[in-house]
Image: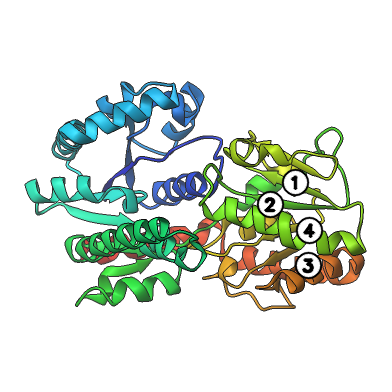
Amino acid sequence: MRVLFTTPILEHPAAGGPQLRVENSIKALSSVCDLYIVARTSEYLMGGASAADYYRQFCKQFITTPTARQLFSNRYLRKGQNIVRNLIGGELRNDGLFIMDILDKEKIDVLWFGYGNLSFSLMKHIKSRKPNIKVVCDTDSVWSRFVLRELPYAKTIWRKAWIKRQGQKKQLEEKAWVNLCEITTAVSEVDAIYYRNLTNNPESVRLFSNVIDLSGYDPKPPPPSGFKNPCLYLAGTFGHYHSPMDTAARWTVDEILPIVRKSIPDIHFYIVGSRSERTLGHLNSDGITVTGKLDSVLPYLCHADVALVPLKFESGTRFKILEAAACNVPVVSTTLGAEGIPVTNGKDIILADDARTFAAGIVKIIKDKEYSKYIARNCRSLIHENYGIPRLEIEARAILESISQ
């Protein structure tokens, strides 16, 4: 079967969860079909020529759209460029024509939208002109939940109104694409149940999980120069005041860390990830390090005492937990932070939803070394057995077989 995979998010080395999902999706699909890749981001943004060469090894053909090739490297100019393109419909029209041309030339059987949550307009545009093409809308989360779950934490009526408007808009899109596409993927049963309730054909909703390539986590790299223990590790994509990760980091610093320091005064807190320095850089001090984007998080993660997932709102399943488990690092998470992963509180992970209980979980892990090893080992076994690339290959094959039937 010939599959054209197109995505607006692509990067190597993968700098975060979205990039990891796309990269591992490509690896899994490449083993079960003839794969063609159309990137809708520039070579510069995906990591340069070496990144493009990396992805070429997994596919028959790797191409970037003309629109992507013309993107400015400066992020402010790029934002303006995208606003203009959206207003005049240039990206939709040009990328649509480009992709449809490849569909015809290469006799593609399935058009797979990686990160389909961001691609509804384009998939609708192509489907309206080529109604017989089989389309997979691959989702990383339930985006409307991602938006609407912030409501209890919004502090102004204007923010609440914006959240409601954006969340309702996304709900309408979700219902539309579930009934437009042959397949909608979900990263967990939690998300799958939501999507199945939007359609009269629940069989069109299939699991396509978040997984990690376990071979990429050995051997253990050395720690960065000056690395401090005992320490806490928080990683993600940051960048604006209201983001889930920024909110999680502030909660940790303001409410959790002071409690932990009563028992462990010399605890160090590492905040790692894209754009973290823009919104949280002012926190840099003797007890907190904000790194910004890194080529690899592993030198920090592998030597952390505890990995934190203190999320108040989000959707999907967390690569933070999968990666920490692969590195044998124990995890303390909110219940929502571990959504979709079948962990057991006290066995594979510590779950806590208030600051005092969260802090107590951190202190227990750091002070009780045997218990720390116990939950890290259990979580690692769970992830190794259920969240590697082989699982995704099985799910990919099942999706394509259902389409061919």
Query: How many angstroms separate mark 3 from mark 4 (CA)?
Result: 7 Å
> SS of the residue at dot 1?
strand
Of circles 1 and 4, which is in front? 4
Residue 199 drawn above or below residue 105: below
| Residue wearing tag 2 | 234
Query: How many angstroms separate mark 3 from mark 2 (CA)?
Result: 14 Å
Cβ–Cβ under 8 Å for marks 4 and 2 = no
User: Which of marks 4 and 3 precedes in the sequence?
Assistant: 4
> SS of the residue at dot 2?
strand
Residue placed most toward the observer, 263 or 159? 159
Percent across and percent down for residue 104 are 13, 38
Q: Point out which mark residue 359 bears.
A: 3
| Number of marks present in the image shown | 4
> SS of the residue at dot 3?
helix
Cβ–Cβ under 8 Å for marks 3 and 4 = yes
Q: Which amino acid does label 1 sit on?
A: Tyr
Percent across and percent down for residue 149 are 45, 66
- Residue at (26%, 66%) from the top-left corner? 402
Q: Point out which mark residue 60 bears.
A: none
